[in-house]
């Protein structure tokens, strides 16, 4: 592991050391049904990274760009 666990547990430390913080979203998705009268619903979970340091953002992209889609 490159960083101590405390880096990932404390937002201020994460922002200082890594240059970003993490936001989690849980979104309700309503989908009308085409085949019957019942509508379906689901939840979509996503994670966003908010960068505060341009150099650390560039290094993140260089290091992890192969795992990013879109």
Image (spheres, rainbow, N blue to C red):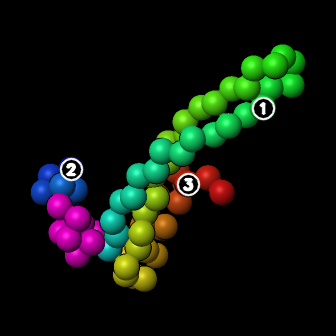
Residue at 41% across / 52% down in the picture? 24
Residue 56 appears in the picture as rendered: yes
Q: Where is residue 13 shown, x and y percent of the image?
A: 18, 69
The residue carrying pointer 3 sits among few (fewer than 14), some (14 to 19) or many (20 or more) residues within 10 Å by Cα, namely few
Q: Is residue 10 above or below residue 35?
A: below
Mark 3 residue element = loop
Q: Nearer the viewer, mark 3 or mark 2?
A: 3
Q: Are marks 1 and 2 in contact (CB under 8 Å)?
A: no
Q: Which residue is mark 3?
A: 68
Q: Which residue is mark 1?
A: 32
Residue located farthest toward the front when viewing the structure as drawn: 37
Q: Nearer the viewer, mark 1 or mark 2?
A: 1
Residue at 53% across / 60% down in the picture? 65
Query: In the image, 23: left or right of 35?
Result: left
Query: In the image, 69: left or right of 7?
Result: right
Q: Main secondary structure of the magenta part?
A: helix
Which is nearer the N-term, disc 1 or disc 3?
A: 1
Real-space Cα separation, disc 1 to disc 2, in angstroms: 45 Å
Q: Where is residue 14 shown, x and y percent of the image?
A: 24, 66
Residue at 43% across / 63% down in the picture? 49
Q: Is residue 64 above or below residue 20?
A: above
Which is nearer the N-term, disc 3 or disc 2?
A: 2
Mark 2 residue element = loop
Q: Nearer the viewer, residue 26 or 56?
A: 26
Q: Nearer the viewer, residue 30 or 21?
A: 30
């Amino acid at each position: 592991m490159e960083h101590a666990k405390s880096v990932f547990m404390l937002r201020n430390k994460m922002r200082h050391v890594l240059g970003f913080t993490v936001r989690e979203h849980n979104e309700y998705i309503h989908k009308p049904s085409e085949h019957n009268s019942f509508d379906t619903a689901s939840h979509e979970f996503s994670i966003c990274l908010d960068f505060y340091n341009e150099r650390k953002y560039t290094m993140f992209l260089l290091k992890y760009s192969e795992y990013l889609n879109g």
